[in-house]
Image (cartoon, grey):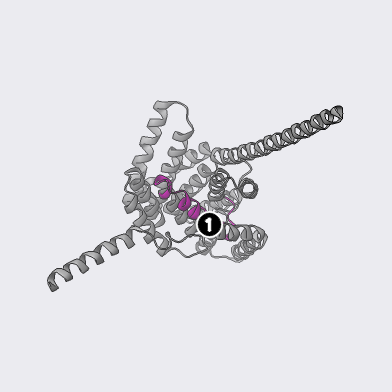
Amino acid sequence: MHVKRFFIITLLLIVTMGLTHATPQNDDTIDLNALYQQIDEAIGLSPQYVAERVRQIDACRSRLLNEEDVEKSVTIAEELFRLYQPYKNDSALHYAEVCISLADSLHRKDLVGRFRSMLAHQCSNAGMYTESLEQLHLVDKNALDKKGLCNYYNAWMHVCGELGYYTQRPHVQLSYYGRQDLYRDSVLMVAEEGSEEWLHLKMDILNARRSYQEALSISDEWLKNVTENTHESAYAAFYRSMVYDKLRNHDMVCYWLGKSALDDIRCAVMNQASLLFLAQHISEDGDVDRAQRYVKFAKDCNLFFCPLLRNYQVNSVVNVYEKSCQATQSRANMTLIIASGVIILLLLVLIVTVLRLRRR
């Protein structure tokens, strides 16, 4: 009996541990309204978050201007690039070119190639595909170290994916997507296991294989290793929302998109994606007014980051505005129906009154 009881208890513990591992912490207890309230408050405080990023940029730029050692200047210029990367695209491009120039003056072909790869990725992320390919063709691949190769393959993977997505020629699309897959494999070969590059690509692959619980396990580890209220935590939360989107878990999609958007707002990230996608879901839930507020804020941010909205951004804005028009039309139709009903009722009352008066 004791052996049987021990076996049952052990089995229950294993099952419980498995469920705990498969069900991410806090994902069973969410409060979307409270999260939306936090986002509303963060949007109101956005000027303060922007001021803090500007303060960091000014301090970093001052250090660069006062630095006489070229090797140290390279490090500071790269820091400036990182500060501008999700904040203002043209400035990020400028400091990527400063990094290339400084590395070239040191005759560091490895650094020149890495910075060109970073510049290429920044270009393709802003829809500048010709410029991206131009930079990548200038890279001396043989001079790159492991870190540089990771940036190089990652930039190629991104631009091939973008070109495949936007082309209307099926055979060209297949060609670009095939190259994207090859570069994805290359990134995974050189990226450090557990790094941001490795984690999001691993989750992409697991999602494609429909191994959603395994993807959530990877996401658990990713979220443990990022600092809260950072652009990195926003990125990790966004990828978690993608898994739940595949699982068709609407509330979890909204929750993790909301967490991602909240972290990006607090970090003064202007290259907004999560908030736009969240606005689409909210508009489908019927909260059109809030969705419109989020879309307006996200659109203003994205236009500050880059003067041209990209395709997915335009689609998100249009979808929410269409929902708004539908809701407005629906309200107008309801008002018309009610008004018609009142008029008909008044006419009936008037007819009855006239008939009674005639009888008298």
If the image is split into quadrants, where does the C terminus sit?
top right
Query: What amino acid type should be assigned to the residue bearing mark 1?
Result: Leu
Residue at x 37% of width, y 61% of height: 221
Q: Is residue 151 above or below residue 342?
A: below
Could you tell me residue 276's position as x and y percent? 56, 47
Q: How many marks?
A: 1
**Residue 257 is one of the magenta-drawn residues:** yes
> Residue 54: which quarter of the image?
bottom right
The region drawn magenta spans 244-271
Residue at x 41% of width, y 53% of height: 110
Q: Is residue 101 above or below residue 1?
A: above
Would you name the residue on which mark 1 appears? 32
> Residue 180: which quarter of the image?
top left
Could you tell me residue 188's position as x and y percent? 33, 50
Residue at x 44% of width, y 34% of height: 164
Could you tell me residue 92's position as x and y percent? 57, 51
Q: Nearer the viewer, residue 170 or 78?
A: 170
Could you tell me residue 165's position as x and y percent? 46, 35
Q: Is residue 152 among the parts visible in the rendering?
A: no
Q: Is residue 270 above or below residue 6?
A: above
